[in-house]
Every structure is written in structure tokens, then in C-alpha cells.
Image (cartoon, rainbow, N blue to C red):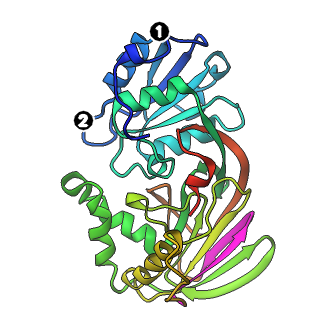
Amino acid sequence: MHGMTGDASNFTRNPGGQRILVVFNPKSGSGDSELPEFIRLLRAAGADVTERELHPDTPMADYVKDLDQFTHLVAAGGDGTVSSLAYAARYKNVPMLAFPAGTANLIAQNLDLPQNASALAEIVQQGHSLRVDMGELEVHGEKSGFCMLAGAGADASMIRDSEELKGRFGAMAYVMSAMKQLNPQKTTFHLKIDGEARDFEGIGVMVANFGMANYRLPITSDISPSDGRFTVILLKAGNIMRLIPNLIDSVRVKLNLGDPIFSGNLETIEARHVEIDADDPFPLQYDGELHVETTPFTTQILPGAIRFLTAAKSDDLKT
């Protein structure tokens, strides 16, 4: 898939009368996006492309209120842009491309999308899509959506610390900030998992839909974005660096290298509805965006809410 090359002459010229809506965040990434070339290739292949720039005071739903007039949707930005646009377009049944224009682009990585404009344009032309779940999050009465994961605790602290480093170090900022989390705050979390109460002491909780971190390394094994369930990850380890053995375990499982050789730092539970509270208010993040809100919050799965364009097969998206 990553070997796709060529220009517009290689594409089938607009076989289905493609009308493509591109919604883009001008602030995403470092300004070297291939979006202009991507749009040029689509137009050269005969597609009718409409561009809409995101503005801070415009609700995301406004950009897709006429989505039924388009055959494809493109979200160009970081994970926050992609997930909020996907939530606005949920169940509208229009295939969507997560165009990687941000810093880490974990959603695009999970979908095994290429980086270059030509290969991305070809994916739109070919039109292959997979239907995946989304998460809906409610905090203080406000609802929003996420594709990747939502979390409270050490992972949110890591994202907060990475913000000042992203301009200089890009995706490595996340690794550097993880190394700073050597003594994160512990608290007692109070959960309701599909209605069943559960308390535990730890450094964080993650509610995962997609399962791969940077460089497509699995967060933990057995996460699928299309099974109608979250994987709830209870972080019990004393610091984020102690979770590295779990990463090694999940890579071993992914590569069929044998049974896990480490355990005990985290626990995973499958669920459709999760309520999270904590003795100490913990910062909240979802899809890589830190938010001013804190615990408590509630999440529920939205089965098959969005169709993502990708050349990948369904099994490629599982950990």
C-alpha cells in the first residue's frame, strides 16, 4: 500500500462523479502538509472538491450540515480535528479520510494510511472503506466524540507536558514527556463498567477504541475498533516507564513470539459503557487533546458510527 505512486494520470478519472468535501485545520502540524498537492491531484482526476477552513467559533456540525450532497469527506488536521469531525458526521454513511496533517496522527497510523499526497489521493479514488466504532464522551453535560481513546491520569499529564515540546521535537515530544512521568500522582478511581462498580488505586484509566500508539506499536493486545466494545485499561504501575514491559508483551503477542512474560502493571476489561470518577480530580484527554475538564466523565461506544477510507483490511486494525 505504501508503495503507491504516480500522478493524476494513473487514477480512474472520476468514475462515480466524486464530490469531495475537505475540512481542514490551518493550525495543524508544522505547516508542511501535502494537502494542497492532494487536492490538486483529486481535481486533476476530475473530482469536484469543496474546501472549508475550520474557525474557532464555528460548531463542527456546521461544516457537514450538507454532507448528503458529497460522496466523500476528508478531515485534514491532527487527531482532535479528525475525531470531532467524525463525531459530527457519525452515522451519515459518507466515507471519510483521516488526512494526516497534525503532529502524531495516531488515527491515520491506526488506519495504516500513507503520508504522501499521491497515495492518499489514490485511496480516495479507490474508495475502499472500513466501518469502525467511535466513543462518545460526556463531561459536565457536554458531549463529544473520540476515535482513538479517552483517558484520565498519567496519560493526560504526559500530553500536557508534551505541548511545549511538540514544536521542536514533533512526535518525539510524547516519548520525552513520558520519561518525565517518573512519579505521577496516584489516586483511587471509582468506575462503573457496564453498570458494575469497581474501585482501584492507580495512576490512570484509558478507554481505548483503536489500539496502536506511535509507530503502530500496540498499547495492549486484543483491541479492535470494530467489535462494538471499548478496551478499558487500568494503569496500576507506579510510573509510565514501568508500562514498557506491557508494551513488550503486546508486541510479542502481535509477532507471535509466545505468551506474555510480564504482567500486573495493568488490567484490561471490555465494556460498552464506562463511568469514571476519582478521589482527586484528574485531567482528561481524548484523541491526544488535553481538556480543561476533569473527572468525572462517562463514555459509551457508538458501534459502526463512521466509515474510514483505507487500503487496510479489517484484521490490520486489530492489536
The quarter of the image holding the C terminus is: bottom right
Residue 223 location in percent, x, y?
61, 64
Residue 59 place in picture, x, y as percent: 55, 33
Dominant SS in magenta: strand
Q: Which residue sits at x=52%, y=21%? A: 21
At 59% from the left and 46% from the top, the residue drawn is 313
- Residue 78, x across and y down, in percent: 41, 44
* Earlier residue among tags 1 and 2: 2
Residue 85: which disc? none
In the rendered image, which residue does mark 1 sit on?
Answer: 46
Crowd class of label 2 (few under 14; some 14 to 19; many from 20; radius 10 Å) = few
Q: Dividing the picture into quarters, in which one does residue 8 lie?
A: top left
* Quarter placement of the N terminus: top left
Residue 305's place in the image compared with 262, above or below, is: above
Q: Which residues are magenta?
A: 264-278
Is residue 54 visible in this depiction of the protein? no
**Quarter assignment of residue 95:** top right
The amino acid pointed to by label 2 is Asp
As drawn, 277 above or below 273? below
Cα separation between marks 1 and 2: 25 Å
Residue 63 in the magenta stretch? The answer is: no
| Secondary element at tag 1 | loop
Q: Which residue is mark 2?
A: 32
Magenta highlight on residue 271: yes
Q: Amino acid at mark 1?
A: Gly
